[in-house]
Amino acid sequence: MVRKYKNYSTEFGVSARRALAERQMTQLDLANSTGVSCAYTNALITGKKKPSPQWVDLISDTLNLTPEQRQELHVAAAKDHGFKLDLSK
C-alpha cells in the first residue's frame, strides 16, 4: 500500500518521504548530507522536478537503503517520468 503524505503526491515523493521517516531524517538533513540545496531537494520530493537516476542513487547511498528499497525508489522515479515497467521477468 502506498501511503500518501501531504504534498507528496508523486510515487517518488511518497517513497522518498517513507525512507526519510524510517531514518528519522528531514529533507534538510538529506540536503545537508548530499550537498544539494534544500530547495532543490524539496522540488524533487514534492514532484516539482523529476529526479535523475544519479540523484536517486545519491540519496539511496546517503540513506543507506537496502537493494530492495533502492529499486523501489528507482521504480517510483521511473513511473513519475512516465515509464511503464514490468519487472516480473
Image (cartoon, helix red, strand yellow):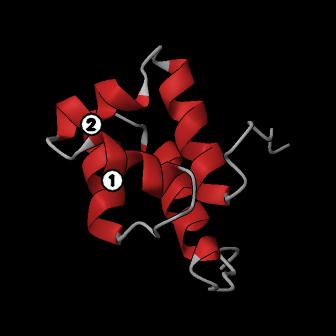
Please give the name of the residue rendered at 20% of the width and 47% of the height, measured from the top-left corner. Answer: 36
Q: Amino acid at mark 1?
A: Tyr
Could you tell which of marks 1 and 2 lies nearer the N-terminus?
Answer: 2
The picture places residue 16, in percent across and down from the top left corner, at 52, 43
Q: Out of 46 and 79, give the one closest to the viewer.
A: 46
Farthest right residue in view: 1
Please give the name of the residue rendered at 53% of the width and 66% of the height, measured from the top-left corner. Answer: 77
Using the image, determine if residue 42 lies above or below residue 64: below
Task: For the N terminus, give its image quadrant.
Answer: top right
Marks 1/2 in contact by CB < 8 Å: the verdict is yes
**Horizontal relation, residue 6 to residue 53: left or right:** right
Foreground mark, 1 or 2, reads 1
What is the tally of numbered marks visible in this picture?
Answer: 2
Please give the name of the residue rendered at 30% of the width and 56% of the height, measured from the top-left corner. Answer: 57
Dot 2 corresponds to which residue?
31
Task: For the C terminus, give its image quadrant.
Answer: bottom right
Q: Amino acid at mark 2?
A: Ala
Query: Residue 40, labelled with which disc?
Result: 1
The picture places residue 32, in percent across and down from the top left corner, at 20, 30
